[in-house]
Image (tube, rainbow, N blue to C red):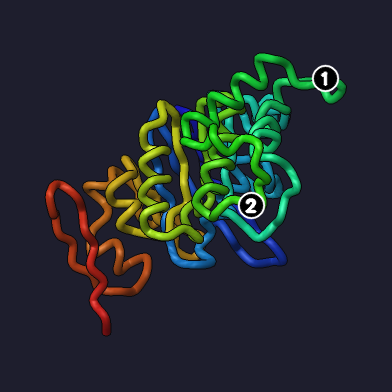
Amino acid sequence: MVFKVDHLQLELNNKSILNDITLQIKKNTFVGIIGANGSGKSTLLKCLTKNLMAYSGIIHFDGQNLRDWKRRDLAKETAVVSQVNDMQFDFSVLEMVLMGREPHKEWWQSETIDDRSIAIKALSSVGLDHLEASKFSSLSGGEKQRALLARALAQETDCLILDEPTNHLDVSNQIAFMNLVKGLPLTVISVIHDLNLAANYCDYIYGLKNGKLVVAGKTTEVLTSHTIRQLFDIETEIYNLKNQTQIVYLLK
């Protein structure tokens, strides 16, 4: 197992955010975390990445209590990609990607030839090597997200954690990004809002509602009209078209 979570509970401002979450994430699987806004999805990711520590219960990563992991060592094993925001970085694309090498260096060390080679290889893998000298702020939304993915790949980790990575992308860029991620030989854990993307890319689904885990299992077995109704209070019909799952939302 990559992650093993036992009876995770979290309260913030006397409000229960996560309630008795127990789950396991296997190596080299693509795991989707779904649920309505405010259900606890992003909070769960923050616990898995040590950005929130005020929880009870136990999280094991690679067989070791997550609390015992030093942040730098954890950053050598897990990389995080968040959704593109409006921040304007005055760095070149290559400089952004080279930031992924920081966990592998001491604070006083400069980048090495190997660091640069790894960063350029990461850019090439996402199809952005021709833009390495461009300013990150000049990129389109899809290009920015691929650059952030390249930065994560430059960390050379075995686990990739994504927080709503396709939210601000158009349909073609969503598919291109998910195809990139799906082809990586990594464990992927992603919060996903688009259920059709979840249905077609995720091996396993965990569904949260009001901080509780109410859906868990293989995507083909648990992502049904019944569970979607449980999580989102909407009616759907699910079709198989050319070996792809298509979820149709029924308007009230």
The mark total stands at: 2
Q: Looking at the rendering, in which quadrant would you find the C terminus?
A: bottom left
Q: Which of marks 2 and 1 is in front?
A: 2
Q: Give SS at disc 2.
A: helix
In the rendered view, does 121 fall on the left or right side of 116? left
Say which residue label 1 marks. 109
Q: How crowded is mark 2: few (under 14 residues within 10 Å), some or many (20 or more)?
A: some
Examine the image and state in which quarter residue 99 appears: top right
Q: Could you tell me which residue is drawn at 22 percent across and 48 percent down?
A: 221
The residue to which callout 2 is attached is 138
Looking at the picture, which amino acid does disc 2 mark?
Answer: Ser
Quarter-of-image position of residue 120: top right
- Residue at 14% from the left image edge and 46% from the top image edge: 243
Residue 44, compared with residue 239, is above or below; it is above
Q: Which of 62 and 141 is in front in this view?
A: 141
Q: Quadrant of the N terminus?
A: top left
